[in-house]
């Protein structure tokens, strides 16, 4: 019975997609993917729609012959099996001294001007997490490293902090964020440590392997 409802859900969605065919411009999919299940790419030029947004356009369920039929579940499973969707990144706000000070300032003296800050977004090695840190310009790379290590419950020697443009490995823990050019904001990446020669100039290492490698966003 459950499988019958699942088939009904897929059939209903096929009909729904057919009715919207003139509005949807679908992206190419693998040969195993039926045409009706291709992930919609855009509604019109300049208006992109992700698979998640597409699923949200579908009703969660419909009632047919007195039975509640799940619509999104079967379609999501089909899209995942033949046209895998990228996982949603988990964003983690890291508790920092700067964040605590700003929280206190906004409560006690909301009219005071906001001091200079550095907003960092640092993606994990596998790209599944993004750590958000509010820091002060005078904070150091070592401060960032220690906060990340504490949040991730691991030794700070088990990862490196890097940027892709310009390709840089931040090795000098005494280097301030201001001096490193990470103010007012920056997007960085984490990777496992590598034993490669680096250029110590400016307190950071220029990694030739990083310059050649493509690291996905």
Image (cartoon, rainbow, N blue to C red):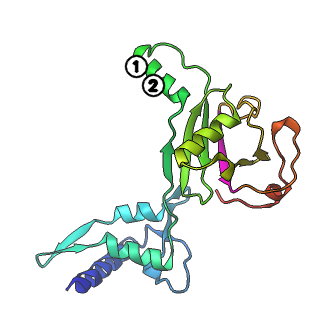
Q: Residue visible at 50% across and 24% down?
A: 102
Which residue is disc 2 drawn over? 103
Residue range (magenta): 185-192
Specify the principal SS of the magenta part: strand
The image quarter containing residue 10 is bottom left
- Pointer 1 residue: 107
* Circle 2 SS class: helix
Corner quadrant of residue 191? bottom right
Identified at 28% across, 78% down, the residue is: 9
Q: Nearer the viewer, residue 140 or 154?
A: 154
Q: Is residue 202 left or right of residue 181?
A: right
User: Which residue is found at the position 27% from the left and 65% from the top?
Assistant: 60
Q: Is residue 35 above or below residue 27?
A: below
Crowding around mark 1 (Cα neighbors within 10 Å: few <14, some 14 to 19, many 20+) is few
Q: Is residue 138 left or right of residue 14?
A: right
Separation of marks 1 and 2 at Cα, in angstroms: 6 Å
Measuring from the top left, give residue 62's x and y in whole percent.
Answer: 21, 71
> Residue at 62% of width from left, 22% of height from top?
116
């Amino acid at each position: 019975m459950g499988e019958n409802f699942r088939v009904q859900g897929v059939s209903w969605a096929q009909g729904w997609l057919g009715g919207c065919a003139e509005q949807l411009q679908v992206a190419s999919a693998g040969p195993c993917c039926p045409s009706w299940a291709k992930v919609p790419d855009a509604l019109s030029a300049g208006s992109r729609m992700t698979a998640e947004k597409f699923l949200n356009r579908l009703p969660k369920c419909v009632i047919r012959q007195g039975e509640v039929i799940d619509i999104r579940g079967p379609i999501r499973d089909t899209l995942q099996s033949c046209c895998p969707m990228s996982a949603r990144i988990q964003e983690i706000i890291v508790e920092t001294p700067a964040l605590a000070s700003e929280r206190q300032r906004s409560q006690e003296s909301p009219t005071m001007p906001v001091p200079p800050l550095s907003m960092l977004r640092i993606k994990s090695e596998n790209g599944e997490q993004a750590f958000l840190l509010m820091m002060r310009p005078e904070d150091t790379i070592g401060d960032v490293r220690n906060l990340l290590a504490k949040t991730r419950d691991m030794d700070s020697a088990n990862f490196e902090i890097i940027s892709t443009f310009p390709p840089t490995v931040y090795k000098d823990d005494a280097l301030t964020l201001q001096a490193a050019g990470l103010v007012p904001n920056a997007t960085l990446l984490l990777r496992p440590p590598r034993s490669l020669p680096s250029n110590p100039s400016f307190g950071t290492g220029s990694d030739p392997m990083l310059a050649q490698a493509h690291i996905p966003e």
